[in-house]
Image (spheres, rainbow, N blue to C red):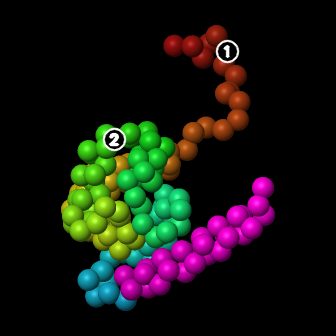
Amino acid sequence: MNPQGGKAYGALKVQQEELLDSLNKEFLESPKYSTDEDLAEKLELFKKKYMEFDLNAQGDIDIMALKRMLEKLGAAKTHLELKKMITEVSGGMRETINYRDFVAMMLGKRSAILKIILMYESMKEKEELPKGPAPKKTVADLP
């Protein structure tokens, strides 16, 4: 195994994070989004989510990355549905979703299909399941 592969990938991820941080700064300084509550926290969350699904760290989410992302979330879609999502988010300009498009979608008023799926996933993550062994019950506890 090539030890450089891991280092090179790590360096790519660092570059990607720096780029996304600079784009987040643009959103923070934009008067269009100045009234958004908790904007810095939202942008940090969006950056993490985007980096999770931009698997090749190239800066865009392509149709295969979107497919894997939605399958991981339990919301598999057909090729046509995926293309429609990308068109909806990118405004039909590209065959990938770049970070600007992604943040604009997440902060925007429109309810894009992808936005709804991602919001549902984040709500699902917040639900805490009980940890540890189940409490012991006696016959008297039964209904």
Q: Which residues fall within the magenta stretch?
A: 1-28
Measured as percent of width and height from the top left, residue 87 is found at 24, 59
Q: Secondary structure at mark 1?
A: loop
Whether residue 38 sits left or right of residue 3 in the image: it is left
Measuring 67% from the left and 15% from the top, which residue is drawn there?
138
Nearest the eye: 51 or 61? 61
Measuring 51% from the left and 13% from the top, which residue is drawn there?
143
Around disc 1, counting alpha carbons within 10 Å, would you say few (fewer than 14), some (14 to 19), or many (20 or more)?
few
| Mark 2 → mark 1, Cα distance in angstroms | 47 Å
Q: Which mark is residue 138?
A: 1
Which residue does the numbered mark 2 point to in the structure image? 77
Q: Residue furthest top?
A: 139
Q: Is residue 143 visible?
A: yes
Seen in the picture, residue 137 relative to 85 is either above or below; the reply is above
Q: Quadrant of the N terminus?
A: bottom right
Residue type for callout 1:
Thr
